[in-house]
Image (tube, helix red, strand yellow):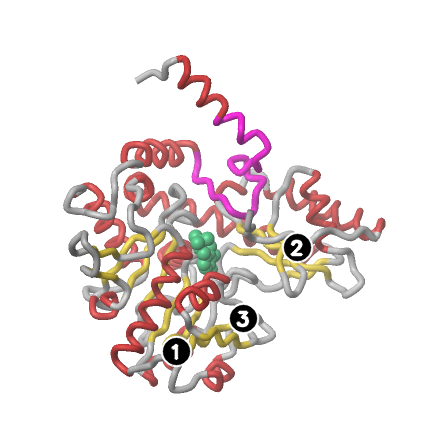
């Protein structure tokens, strides 16, 4: 249908509101957004629009959404080598997947071992969403310092655990420096104690699966590793679908049962839900299903190869720029770097200069660093970006300017 006059005006206002937003489709934004090209975007947006008001709370009423979820989860189970027993759910994003992993671990500890003051043992590099989960669900977060190479320190994690530990966490890769933790060793700690091990592959799940299929050697990272009990993969990142789509996969249905919630303790009858949300838009589920069908294995292999190649190109360039230090060789597509010396160019001033030139990168620390989430949309712009980074480092070095820290998320 064509919009009427009033609808046209309102839609134009809506579009105009985005005027100052970052230009994420032009390959100038290295954080927060992912772009798989105009056709992928079109498929995602149209599929999303078709089901945006359908409600995933009750799949009996919407068999379409049930089908989308079960097909999407089945595909992700293949990516993470889950095997025949694995079972999962779609969630609204990485944070909800992680909330559910922590909640499931707490519940298992309570029911199987009577633990009422549970703790989680996790490296300092694990995502902030684990902190949120511990805070929401009343678990103690036991952060353990990472090694010099930014990977989790398994011996220190073992020492931090006790009889109230219900969960060990590993990441593939961790967000801040983009490296994969020693997952078999961490999973073994969990296995020995009969507790959960969650692998946060929110960022790497799609990329690592297709790097391996293209013949790159990838360290063990998924459910093929004994002792891993659950894993999260975000589709709204390197799955290149619309925002609001992630998957959590558990090793089997028993472990998954600790995630769900059912009650009849109100006047409205039996109420069950798999995750945090009640009413749940079908839009992201439909978009994920449609984009996955549209891209297929070939599409993902090609987008992954492009992103990976581009990330390595940036990493090589950073290593060649005087005054910069690459935090780690990227294990997937995340590139993190800082100032080589304590009194070298202020890295946040470099980010300010890049921002003035129309680039958006993530600022993080400790230590003060810039972080680039490289995706397929950067292939055509990476050389310009590298030239501007080189220039910005030189300018800041000469002027001695200081920059502002910034943050990954906001509260207002
Ligand atoms: C993005 C991310 C998350 C959180 O996911 P959201 O989709 O932002 O909620 C968790 N872990 C890692 C490693 C991530 O990159």
Mark 1 Cβ and ligand 1 under 8 Å apart:
no
Secondary structure type for disc 1: loop
Q: Which residue is mark 2?
A: 318
Q: Nearer the viewer, residue 209 or 185?
A: 185
Measured in 3D between alpha carbons, the distance from the residue under mark 3 to the one under mark 2, in whole angstroms, is 25 Å
Residue at 28%, 64% in the rendered image = 259
Q: Residues within 10 Å of mark 1 (few under 14, many from 20)?
A: many
Q: In the current view of this chain or complex, which residue is farthest to the top?
A: 5
Q: Earlier in the sequence, mark 2 or mark 1?
A: 1
Q: Which residue is mark 3?
A: 124
Secondary structure type for disc 3: loop
Do the residues under discs 3 and 1 have CB atoms within 8 angstroms?
A: no
Q: Nearer the viewer, residue 266 or 150?
A: 266
Question: In terms of image quarters, where does ligand 1 lie?
Answer: bottom left
Query: What x and y, as percent, mark residue 96?
Result: 38, 57
Query: What x and y, as percent, mark residue 120?
Result: 43, 75
């Amino acid at each position: 249908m064509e919009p009427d006059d009033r609808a046209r005006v309102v839609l134009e206002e809506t579009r105009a509101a985005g005027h100052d937003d970052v230009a994420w489709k032009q390959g100038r934004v290295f954080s927060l957004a992912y772009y798989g090209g105009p056709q992928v975007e079109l498929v995602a947006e149209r599929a999303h629009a078709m089901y945006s008001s359908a409600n995933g709370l009750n799949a009996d009423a919407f068999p379409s959404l049930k089908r989308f979820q079960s097909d999407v989860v089945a595909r992700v189970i293949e990516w993470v080598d889950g095997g025949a027993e694995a079972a999962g759910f779609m969630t609204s994003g990485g944070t909800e997947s992680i909330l559910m992993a922590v909640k499931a671990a707490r519940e298992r500890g309570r029911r199987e071992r009577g633990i009422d003051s549970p703790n989680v043992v996790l490296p300092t590099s694990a995502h902030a969403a684990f902190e949120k989960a511990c805070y929401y669900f009343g678990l103690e977060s036991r952060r353990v310092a990472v090694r010099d190479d930014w990977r989790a320190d398994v011996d220190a994690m073992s020492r931090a655990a006790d009889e109230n530990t219900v969960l060990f966490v590993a990441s593939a890769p961790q967000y801040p420096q983009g490296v994969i933790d020693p997952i078999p060793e961490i999973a073994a700690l969990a296995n020995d104690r009969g507790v959960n091990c969650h692998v946060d592959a929110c960022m790497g799940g799609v990329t690592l699966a297709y790097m391996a299929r293209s013949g790159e050697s990838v360290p063990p990272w998924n459910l093929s590793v004994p002792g891993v009990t659950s894993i999260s993969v975000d589709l709204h990142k390197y799955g290149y679908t619309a925002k609001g789509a992630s998957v959590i996969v558990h090793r089997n249905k028993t472990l998954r049962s600790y995630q769900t919630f059912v009650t009849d303790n109100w006047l409205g009858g039996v109420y069950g839900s798999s995750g945090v949300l009640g009413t749940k838009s079908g839009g992201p589920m439909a978009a994920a299903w449609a984009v996955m069908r549209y891209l297929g294995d070939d599409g993902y292999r090609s987008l992954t190869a492009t992103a990976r190649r581009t990330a390595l190109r940036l990493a090589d360039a950073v290593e060649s720029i005087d005054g910069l230090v690459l935090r780690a060789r990227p294990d997937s597509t995340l590139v993190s770097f800082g100032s080589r010396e304590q009194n070298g160019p202020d890295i946040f001033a470099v980010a300010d200069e890049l921002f003035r030139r129309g680039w958006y990168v993530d600022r993080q620390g400790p230590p003060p660093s810039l972080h680039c989430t490289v995706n397929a949309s950067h292939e055509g712009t990476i050389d310009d970006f590298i030239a501007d980074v080189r220039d910005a480092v030189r300018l800041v070095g000469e002027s001695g300017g200081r920059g502002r820290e910034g943050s990954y998320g906001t509260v207002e």
